[in-house]
Image (spheres, grey):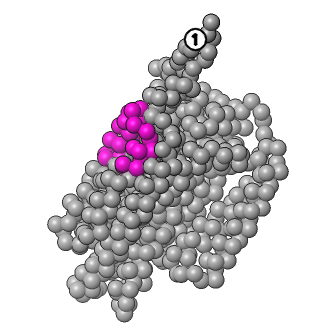
């Protein structure tokens, strides 16, 4: 006689939920770092006087380095221990933050931001992989990842307020020091509350694969960035070709190795592939819009850093709301439909940004539209990440986590580069003939006393025109992405219907 019995997965204990709070700390730090930098950019630009290329690299290099090192760090964590790598990365992040704080040139700040990217690449795969170790039940894991993603939003919500206060009382470098006390709490609590995890099979890190992964990612991203900024020039095309060539060598090497740096068999999972696509393209529109909205508040609306931080609070709180509620909705509704619905909800948000003007009465419209966009981001971050991590065995959680973070960081970097460059192109076309436009609106605002009021107004209107076009373009892209998400993820069941994964016949 046989019967089917549902054997529930082990439920997380209070200690594991406390451990989740520890794992949320690095996410909080990274959220703080993102928004604080956006707010600090005008002040540090006036102090360090970066040219337009240096200013973009200050913004971009962090995401590029994270994208380049995530796969390496995911494998390294499996080898030396995920908790150990987390702590090493936290120490490195705090050190690089102090270097950034006391940078005395644009070049030094770019180097510090690059080191922050390498350190950041150790944090995210470790935290996500440890969540997979600690939460075996799919519903609890989804909720834990939702909370984890929400802490990023909490950092972004606190970042403008904390950063705005810091920037109103101290020099811009102090904004980078906000992360240091949070890192200290992590270093004290991690050994007490987090388990250690090592792969059962020790794998030697293939340094040639590490080099090939960097030689693939960095030229490709650089080529896209330069191509979007200056058109299909020889340098951008050459970088793309170089990246593709090294990428093909990297793939061939991974297929030959017994223990590859990147397990290509992961891509045989259709759910993982679909979730990665949605995360990548979903983040492009959000990141580019974030850059433009923060600049709008400070450079167009003439707000102080602290005032801009307060206005950026509601959008980030909407992301918190989405990150905590989306996993609960996905227990009853297929996650693909939840993601598609959230993307569709962001389209009116982009629409509001596409019709905003430089008039002060439009500030609420801009923030309201951005709030809808951030609600979509919270859903994507929570459900998209869970779909990627949940699609693979726990033993491969480090690699899957690295892939998830890689496409998100790449999406952010590409969004800043592509949409930022599109907005700049519109700005320069509208300001053609004006000598002061070479380095963008921030340079015009910094020299406002030397310019006529009409030139300043024209520059603000030109910036807003660029924001309008990028928002409208993003809305069209998000509409397509929503349809793609609904189709590609339609076979993924709601988490309450995943009991079959826990059934055995006796």
Question: For the point 43% across and 70% down, which residue is it?
Answer: 420
User: For residue 427, what is the image quadrant?
Assistant: bottom left
Would you name the residue on which mark 1 appears? 3
**Quadrant of the image for the C terminus?**
top right
Image vertical order of residue 46 relative to residue 264, above or below: below
Question: For the point 58% across and 49% down, which residue is it?
Answer: 273
Image vertical order of residue 357 relative to residue 307, above or below: below
Residue with the most extreme front position: 1
Most frequent secondary structure within the magenta stretch? helix
Question: For the point 67% across and 77% down, which residue is it?
Answer: 238
Residue 145 visible:
yes
Question: For the point 64% across and 53% down, which residue is it?
Answer: 69
Part of the protein shown in magenta:
316-342
Residue 165 coordinates in the image, percent (x, y):
31, 53
Residue 466 coordinates in the image, percent (x, y):
35, 75
Q: Nearer the viewer, residue 393 or 449?
A: 393
Residue 103 visible:
no
């Amino acid at each position: 006689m046989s019967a089917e019995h549902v054997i529930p997965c082990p439920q997380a204990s209070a200690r594991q939920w406390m451990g989740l709070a520890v794992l949320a700390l690095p996410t909080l730090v990274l959220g703080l770092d993102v928004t604080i930098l956006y707010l600090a950019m005008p002040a540090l630009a006036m102090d360090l006087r970066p040219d337009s290329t240096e200013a973009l690299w200050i913004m971009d290099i962090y995401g590029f380095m994270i994208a380049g090192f995530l796969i390496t760090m995911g494998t390294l964590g499996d080898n030396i221990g995920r908790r150990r790598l987390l702590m090493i990365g936290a120490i490195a992040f705090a050190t690089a933050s102090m270097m950034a704080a006391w940078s005395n040139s644009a070049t030094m700040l770019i180097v510090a931001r690059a080191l922050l990217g390498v350190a950041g690449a150790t944090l995210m795969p470790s935290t996500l992989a440890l969540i997979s170790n600690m939460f075996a039940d799919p519903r609890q894991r989804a909720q834990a990842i939702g909370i984890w993603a929400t802490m990023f939003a909490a950092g972004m919500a606190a970042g403008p307020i904390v950063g705005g206060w810091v920037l109103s009382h101290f020099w811009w470098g102090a904004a980078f020091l906000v992360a240091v006390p949070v890192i200290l709490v992590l270093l004290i609590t991690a050994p007490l509350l987090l388990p250690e995890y090592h792969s059962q099979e020790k794998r030697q890190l293939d340094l040639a694969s590490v080099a090939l992964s960097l030689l693939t990612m960095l030229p490709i991203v650089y080529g896209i960035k330069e191509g979007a900024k200056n058109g299909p020039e020889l340098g951008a095309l050459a970088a793309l070709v170089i990246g593709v060539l090294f990428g093909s060598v990297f793939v061939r090497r991974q297929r030959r190795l017994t223990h590859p740096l990147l397990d290509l068999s992961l891509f045989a999972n259709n759910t993982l592939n679909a979730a990665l696509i949605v995360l990548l393209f979903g983040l492009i529109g959000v990141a580019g819009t974030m850059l433009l909205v923060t600049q709008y508040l400070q450079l167009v609306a003439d707000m102080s850093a602290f005032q801009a931080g307060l206005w950026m609070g509601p959008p980030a709180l909407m992301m918190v709301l989405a990150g905590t509620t989306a996993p609960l909705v996905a227990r009853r509704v297929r996650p693909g439909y939840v993601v598609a619905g959230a993307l569709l909800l962001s389209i009116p948000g982009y629409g509001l940004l596409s019709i905003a003007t430089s008039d002060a009465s439009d500030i609420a419209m801009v923030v309201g539209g951005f709030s809808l966009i951030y609600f979509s981001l919270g859903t994507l971050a929570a459900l998209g990440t869970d779909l990627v991590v949940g699609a693979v065995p726990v033993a491969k959680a480090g690699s899957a986590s690295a892939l998830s973070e890689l496409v998100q960081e790449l999406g952010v970097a590409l969004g800043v580069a592509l949409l930022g460059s599109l907005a700049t192109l519109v700005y320069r076309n509208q300001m053609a003939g004006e000598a002061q436009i070479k380095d963008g609106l921030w340079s015009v605002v910094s020299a406002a006393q030397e310019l006529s009021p009409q030139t300043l107004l024209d520059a603000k209107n030109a910036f807003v025109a660029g924001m309008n076009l990028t928002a409208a373009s993003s809305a069209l892209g998000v509409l397509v992405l929503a349809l793609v998400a609904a189709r590609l993820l339609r076979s993924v069941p709601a988490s309450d219907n995943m009991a079959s994964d826990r059934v055995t016949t006796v």
